[in-house]
Image (cartoon, coloured by chain):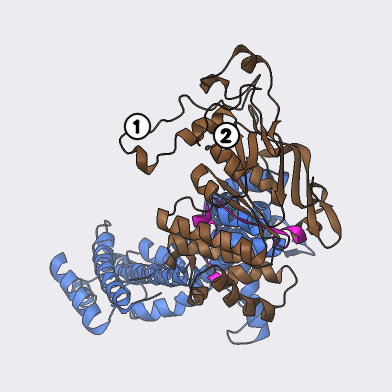
Chain colours: A blue, B brown
Amino acid sequence: MLTARYLERRVIYLFITFFIAVSINFFLPRLIPGNPVFTILLSRYGNQIKPQYLQLIESELNLRGTLWQQYVGYMSSLFLHGYLGVSFYYYPATVSSIIFSHLPWTLFLLGTATLLSVFIGVSIATYIGWRLGGKADSLISSISIGLGSLPFFWLGLIFQIVFGLMIVIDGQHLFPIAHAFSASVYPGLTFSFISSVLYHSALPIITLVLISFPGFTLLMRNTISTIINDDYVQMARAKGLRTWRIKKMYVNRNARLPIATSVALAFGSIVGGAFLVEVVFSYPGIGYMLYNAVTTSDFPLIDGIFLMITITVIIANFIVDLLYAILDPRVVLE
Amino acid sequence: MSGNELLEVKDLSISYVTRDERIDAVRNVSLTLEKGSIHGLVGESGCGKSTLATIFLNLIYPPARLVGGSLRYFGGPSGEISVLELKAPELRRYRWKEVSMIFQGSMNSLNPVMRVYEQIIDAMIDHDYTFEEAMLRVDTLLELAGISKRVKNLYPHELSGGMKQRVNIAIALACEPKAIIADEPTTALDVVVQSQITRKLESLRRDLGLSILFISHDISLVGAIADKISVMYAGKIVEVGKAEEILNTPAHQYTIALLASIPTLKSVESRISGIPGHPPRLNTPITGCAFADRCSKAQNRCRTENPELESISGDHFAACFFPGGGSNS
């Protein structure tokens, strides 16, 4: 159940979180040593930097005055006009235009990987949850613990080496190791483009899923192992119900409740994983852009991307809350 | 026997077996539930009465293990059924259709994420009722259990303890069973609701001709509704007989002590006398009478010889070398 009071409080909470995150996002990158303006000018004009260029660019990029003045300027333009500023490195492109052209790639990776992880994790757990203590259970449980503790970037690199370089069939590598689609296709709703996108996303998504699903498997397996001894499951057996009904309506319906909570918690880690995987695979999502932004001290772009992460995680948590209220009639959101 | 039996347990033994321990929870028990009667099974916590209850639906799962014995059911259309030999599909059809159960942990025996009516109809649908038939029956069942039919769309957490128990009764009646095993059906309910539920079970027996095995630790509660009473101690039945015989002329020293521990309205001034000591742990074999260490009349013989159930008078049996002496009448 959902009440108006819940929504109201949720929006206030969201706003406070948002404000704090934006403030931290603003100051954090500016603590990195180095002057971004020099970096930009050096990259464009080599050693011929004139002082008047410096001043011109500083005022254009909101880099004049004290840090506090810059903060006030940034916050007021953000909250009054929704303006995220101009990228230093991709000047004169605005931060929002850069984010919106790269965000879909990240959402694609993230969304597919999360859904697949939950689906695979829950399916495997349902299978072994009914064979607790058996061979499949101990094998899958130990593999899950091992797999779940691998670092994202490491597994990504291994996959690149093995499936992208080492295995060659008919003079062709098995999978591409970089970019979101082949340079030979034009973006559009064509079969060649979509298949190229899926082909390029295979390794990054497999990397993300393989490391993310074991957490769900282990959690659900353990939940099932306790629920199976609960009174209402005993009663379901006594009622002479068909086995599929006991599994579906009595065990799984209850076992999936903790999964909803853990999806919310795991989402942050999957976001982090997706960013690393994007960097490893030079995948043009905002994680890859963040990496570029940090190496070039592109403060506005760093701020903007962090802002997107904050919003994504907050919204994901909100959706999970709503989902939980649907799954469990005992939960009242107020 | 009179040919009036519905369920007959014979020489039943159930043990809990773990890696380093074996607990003989039910030891060589025989028990008969007659058609249309209420049979009370009384004993203190841990005496094995709930374990014994699970046999009627063959709900023995590890670590519990059936060591020996049989259960025969005489109410089926095709005559006698040996319940413990049924294969999985036949056992599933026997469960709830022939014998149903009200569980001890009835507060938790409803699925928290299913509506009341869903939990009533699923039993019927899996026992060959059509969905329409099952839905039509929901109101009747709730009415039989003495609860408003409006609760059918609620979830268990929206019900009080007494209401949940009535829902459990409605579920137990769903497939028109011949017998109900009621395992501590009134535990965790307040005394008013307790007596309502007890009277409800009694009226169901009368109106539907049900047989009820009423399991409780409260001998006075059982005495109020049961036709026959079995008293269980340390995994064995130590005394069995007509309710009034057990209550008025108890034979086994344990039953006598149990009855003496009931507070009465007249005994306000006096202290309630408990039974000193504890029941034995059942992880080692017991020689002699299990009650000997707590019994005021115990002799050497009680510690070395194993007393068997012997007739005191007619249908009244007790497993005691020195029966009687504590008449309540």
Please give the name of the residue rendered at 27% of the width and 58% of the height, measured from the top-left corner: A34
Q: Nearer the viewer, mark 2 or mark 1?
A: 2
Q: Look at the image and say whether residue B260 sits in the magenta stretch.
A: no
Q: State the residue in front, B318 or A61.
A: B318
Which residues, given as a range, are shown in magenta?
Answer: B93-116
Residue A334, image x, y percentages? 32, 71
Q: Amino acid at mark 2?
A: Pro
Q: In the displayed orientation, state which residue is furthest to the right.
A: B78
Is residue A30 rendered to the left or right of residue A249? left
> Quick one: label 2 or label 1, which is nearer the N terminus?
2
Q: Residues within 10 Å of mark 2 (few under 14, many from 20)?
A: many
Residue extending farthest top: B300
Q: Nearer the viewer, residue B315 or A157?
A: B315
The residue under label 1 is B271
Based on the picture, tell me whether residue B100 belongs to the magenta stretch: yes
For badge 1, the amino acid type reads Arg
Outermost residue to the bottom? A189
Output the chain of dot 2.
B
Q: Secondary structure at mark 1?
A: loop
Q: Where's residue B131, x and y in %?
A: 68, 78
Is residue A193 in view?
yes
Q: Are marks 2 and 1 in contact (CB under 8 Å)?
A: no
Q: Determine the image quadrant of residue B10.
A: top right
Chain under numbered label 1: B
**For residue B72, above or below residue A270:** above
Q: Which residue is mark 2?
A: B250
Whether residue B270 is situated above or below residue B104 in the rendered picture: above
Which numbered tag is attached to residue B10?
none
